[in-house]
Image (cartoon, grey):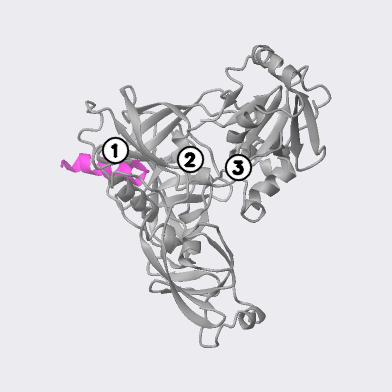
């Protein structure tokens, strides 16, 4: 390289502007999304457009966050310099791990020649670089040290490993998703950034590698869970109560085992003390000693070190006696919960009966009350969602509730009712919304008897009047349908 050109390249790098070789390892991603309105479950909200920067991976694929493409309607990739755009498609998305893999159409050459980013793990103290694109296609690089690696909550549910770094990221177009790089290799995807504290939360390489390996297997299975809750055992009284020998310095006290979970199937019980997972000792706080990141929660062993179908060995104390249990890890689908932790890329289920809007409780419904949904959503709905494992261990499969009432001739006097748990219709105990149509086929003495958990315990709808108002309700409120149960 000519000396002047070499010095100019160094100057670009020193100022935070990357060379064209680095620039071609990223691509602009443009998406249009349209989510369902869970408080009006027959319709959608206004479309939203988002722009992001995707990391180019081997095989001409592109990595972004899953929340970028949630409820996707259109997706395209754009040349970093702008101008040229090609349609793209979604290969796989995991909303729990917040990762998505994209690809261009088969005949597109947009990514041809783009150097694919290899993936590397990072350690505390490493200098990480966040890549952004300027309007002219130049790559803006912001650097900062990695400060911690810990388990933290992701956008929709649960907790995974994150890298946390301190840096001052500048606001730019296409900044919804940003690659994070360590020495020219991809080490993470920016998940969130707090400008006030300058803390960047990063989806780290181990989670990304797990996701990509699972996708490459041809049938994406998701991240496994074990299915128990625990209490630390720092309290000497608890240790004596649990009959933990003095020779055992660690261990956690099992407070809950989810029904039908891998832990339950393995024979783990409430009151057991978990002291070891495979070759890793569990300390009094539920941590293990990770070779790369130090003390982190043992959940990382289950959901990132292992894949669905893997067997793990649990060493426990039961009434002071050592036992060995083998668990086969599984992924729990969101629709298997009594209250779905998230509903994305699928529409909410509902049935309208004479103006009564019946729905199934989900965290997505609660989140539609806004960012401060924990304050604004009805307390009883939050309570049912939060404690669903304890409250509804023996059913129903789903919580059917009356969300609100559309005023009609069949619902006179009931217009103010809302957010009531429906237990029976015409004497039929409801396990889910699937039971509603059949229950409505058998009115009691010409009336639909609808029973609730709370006051008013029972209301009655004239069956003939209810049927007569169906067409009226659909036309008056311009509804495409009066139910959706798929």
Image quadrant where residue 7 sits: top left
Could you tell me if residue 175 is visible in this image? no
- Give the mark nearer the N terminus: 3 vs 2: 2
Tell us which disc is closer to us: 3 or 2.
3
Question: Could you say which is closer to the camera, residue 359 or residue 212?
Answer: 359
- The image position of residue 423, as x and y in percent, is 70, 41
Give whichever of 138, 343 is nearer the camera.
343
Query: Residue 433: x percent and y percent?
Result: 60, 35
- Please tell me whether residue 217 is drawn above or below residue 442 in the rendered image: below
- What range is drawn magenta here? 1-17
The answer, for residue 229, to whether it is visible in the render is yes
| In contact (CB < 8 Å): disc 3 and disc 2 | no
118 vs 149, left or right, is left
Q: CA distance from mark 3 to mark 1?
A: 38 Å
Give coordinates of residue 97: x percent, y percent: 45, 48
Query: Pointer 3: residues within 10 angstroms few (<14), some, or many (20+)?
Result: many
Percent coordinates x, y for residue 300 in the rendering: 44, 61
| The one of 423 and 380 positioned closer to us in this rendering | 423
Residue beneath label 2, please? 170
Q: Is residue 123 left or right of residue 191?
A: left
Q: Which mark is residue 61?
A: 1
User: Up-down: is 275 above or below 347?
Assistant: below
- Which badge, 1 or 2, comes first in the chain's sequence? 1
């Amino acid at each position: 390289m000519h000396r002047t050109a070499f010095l100019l390249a160094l100057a670009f790098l020193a100022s935070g502007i990357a060379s064209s070789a680095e620039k071609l390892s990223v691509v602009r991603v443009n998406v249009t999304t349209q989510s369902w309105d869970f408080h009006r479950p027959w319709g959608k909200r206004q479309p939203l457009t988002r722009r992001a920067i995707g990391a180019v991976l081997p095989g001409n694929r592109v990595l972004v966050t899953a929340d970028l493409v949630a409820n996707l309607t259109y997706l395209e990739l754009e040349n970093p310099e702008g101008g040229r755009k090609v349609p793209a498609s979604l290969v796989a998305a995991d909303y729990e791990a917040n990762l998505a893999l994209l690809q261009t159409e088969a005949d597109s050459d947009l990514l041809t020649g783009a150097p694919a980013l290899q993936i590397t793990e990072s350690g505390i103290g490493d200098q990480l670089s966040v890549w952004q694109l300027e309007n002219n296609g130049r790559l803006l690089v912001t650097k900062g040290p990695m400060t911690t690696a810990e388990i933290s909550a992701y956008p929709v549910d649960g907790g995974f490993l994150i890298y946390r770094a301190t840096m001052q990221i500048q606001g730019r177009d296409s900044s919804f998703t940003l690659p994070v790089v360590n020495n020219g290799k991809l080490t993470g995807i920016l998940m969130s950034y707090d400008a006030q504290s300058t803390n960047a939360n990063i989806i780290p390489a181990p989670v990304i590698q797990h996701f990509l390996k699972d996708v490459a297997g041809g049938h994406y299975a998701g991240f496994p869970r074990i299915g128990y809750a625990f209490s630390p055992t720092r309290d000497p009284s608890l240790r004596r109560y649990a009959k933990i020998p003095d020779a055992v310095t660690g261990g956690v006290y099992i407070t809950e085992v989810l029904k039908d979970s891998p832990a339950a199937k393995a024979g783990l019980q409430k009151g057991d003390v978990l002291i070891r997972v495979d070759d890793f000792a569990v300390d009094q706080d539920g941590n293990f000693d990770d070779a790369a990141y130090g003390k982190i929660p043992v959940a990382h062993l289950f959901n990132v070190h292992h894949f669905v179908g893997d067997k793990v060995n649990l060493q426990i104390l039961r009434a002071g006696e050592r036992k060995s249990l083998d668990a086969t890890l599984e992924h729990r689908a969101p629709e298997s919960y009594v209250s779905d932790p998230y509903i994305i890329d699928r529409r909410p289920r509902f049935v309208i009966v004479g103006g009564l809007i019946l729905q199934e409780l989900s965290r997505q419904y609660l989140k539609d009350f806004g960012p401060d949904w924990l304050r604004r959503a009805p307390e009883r709905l939050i309570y049912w969602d939060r404690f669903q494992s304890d409250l509804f261990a023996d059913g129903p499969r789903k919580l059917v509730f009356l969300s609100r009432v559309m005023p009609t001739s069949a619902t006179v006097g009931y217009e103010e009712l809302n957010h009531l748990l429906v237990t029976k219709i015409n004497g039929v105990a409801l396990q889910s919304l699937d039971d509603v149509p059949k229950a409505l086929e058998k009115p009691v003495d010409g009336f639909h008897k609808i029973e609730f958990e709370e006051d008013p315990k029972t209301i009655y709808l004239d069956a003939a009047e209810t049927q007569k108002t169906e067409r009226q309700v659909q036309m008056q409120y311009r509804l495409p349908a009066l139910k959706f149960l798929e």
